[in-house]
Amino acid sequence: SETVRVAAVDLGATSGRVMSGRITRDRVEINELHRFPNGAVRAGGSLFWDVLGIYRETLAGIREVARTGPLHGVGIDSWAIDYGLVDRDGALLGSPYSHRDARTDGVAEKVVAEVGAAELYATTGIQQLPFNTLYQLVAARGSAALEAAEAMLLLPDLLGYWLTGAAGAERTNASTTQLYDVRTGEWATDLCRRLGIPWGILPPLRDPGSVLGPLLPEVARDLGAAADVPVVAVGSHDTASAVVGVPAEGRNFGYLSSGTWSLVGLELDAPVLSEAARLADFTNEAGVDGTVRFLKNVTGLWVLSESLRSWSERRYQDVELRSLIEAAADFPPLRSIVDINDPRLLAPSTAADPMPERVAALAAEAGEQVPHSPVAIARCIVDSLAVAYRRHLRTATELAGVSPEVLHVVGGGSQNEVLCQLTADACGLPVVAGPVEAAALGNVLVQGRSLGADLPDLAAMRDLVRRSYDVRRYQPREGLDWAAAEARIR
Ligand code: ADP
Ligand code: LRH
């Protein structure tokens, strides 16, 4: 059958990338044509995303895809939860806040006191991250921007709006907001009413795979693209697209989407809304094709990348990711274990409150050996991540009543060989690492299906990934007492 060639925009918290993606009868392949750094900007005491800069780079990337061959579609996925507000003229009301901004401090506790944790979970099935969109909107109550807002658009939907003029909310990403009713698949308007959130700003929901519309004529001209190129709503939550792109055989697998955040969990057919799941604080996010992503957020390689940023700002000339990882591999294991999900690790590193010192302080507080050197800190981070994956994957399997036989690791962190091996060891499962750009692949595959490729279900998509990409396998090793290591964190 004919080749489909699309632009896949995958926006991560630390970098954005634009790929050309090609689907033929027996292969899917992506080619990275544009990559740019991303990060929140502190201005006027708050933490924002430079969304216009992100849009400019997105356009530059799509233009490059259009310049180098046919362009049949465009799809955008990004990190979840964050949004822009637009007014009745369609104008953006200020820069979108980063979920790491401090304005939501203490808000979740107030909402829980008002609504009750059990009811919140029964409706939304979402874990209590302090910065969920729900809490961001509660923090914004009474603000001029919220009062003037006509629509709340999650970031991929905002960029899609600029490309096509069509406003909406793609379902996989909408489900992460804690404003979405996981039982009915509609916005949780009653919850919004009770909390004084203007629910009229929640735009119509759209399914992954649906078409937003063609590029606006002036956008198409600017991109050097044909006027009728459709923008496709993919799994616009990057994690949803990453799970599509996992090269799994069958359904009996766990996944770890390892980037700035680590998302560890299972793909299920229905949400798990039990009291035990709520107490374990597991999330039920909507996946592509009606699946449920039952998972846990782990603070992830953010802790390492912010430590690196801190060291480089303080001019430790010798600290570079690759060599640090290699040195950490030879460093004595399991010396210091910290609770990597401690909320004190969420905010960006600053000169006054540097990330490495926060890690050391957590170790001291827990009575662990205190890591000082960059290599000791890095080892503490990878050991602590592996312990967290072990705990949460086991909890997920207990809560869902399944037992995966393999753990698929995708995302930038799948290139971290030490961490992949420790993950296999800690979880006692074979790890299959790669592809690195699973989110972009998932994006391409869902677009491809909408544009006519013969990909009836997720199994067919994953089959294509498996046939097109090499993976690396890690067998679990014996020798370290991971159960004892896990018992050292609360
Ligand atoms: P995001 O999409 O959230 O921006 P990525 O999936 O790009 O994140 O993953 C970024 C992380 O991947 C980095 O913080 C780093 O720890 C890890 N990483 C990237 N490249 C490599 C590499 N070559 N070796 C080991 N780890 C890597
Ligand atoms: C990963 C991710 C994750 C969300 C977080 C805000 O990039 O989308 O799934 O919880 O960003």
Image (cartoon, rainbow, N blue to C red):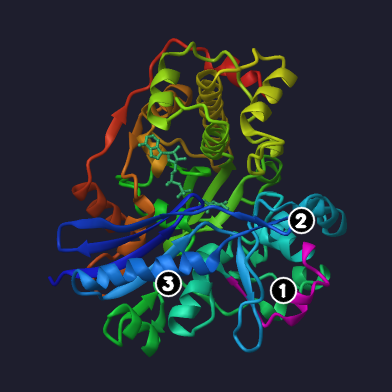
In the displayed structure, would residue 165 be above or below residue 54? below
Image coordinates of residue 279 in percent, x first then y, are 71, 41
* Sequence-first tag of 3 and 2: 2
Q: Is residue 220 left or right of residue 110?
A: left
- In the picture, the quarter occupied by the N terminus is bottom left
* Sequence-first tag of 1 and 3: 1
Find residue 368 and name its label.
Answer: none
* Sequence-first tag of 2 and 1: 2
Find residue 189 and name its label.
Answer: 1
Q: Is residue 368 magenta?
A: no
Q: Is residue 234 visible?
A: no
Image coordinates of residue 204 in percent, x first then y, are 57, 80
Q: Which residue is mark 3?
A: 233
The part of the chain drawn in magenta is 139-153
Residue 22, by quadrant, is bottom left
Q: Which residue is mark 2?
A: 103
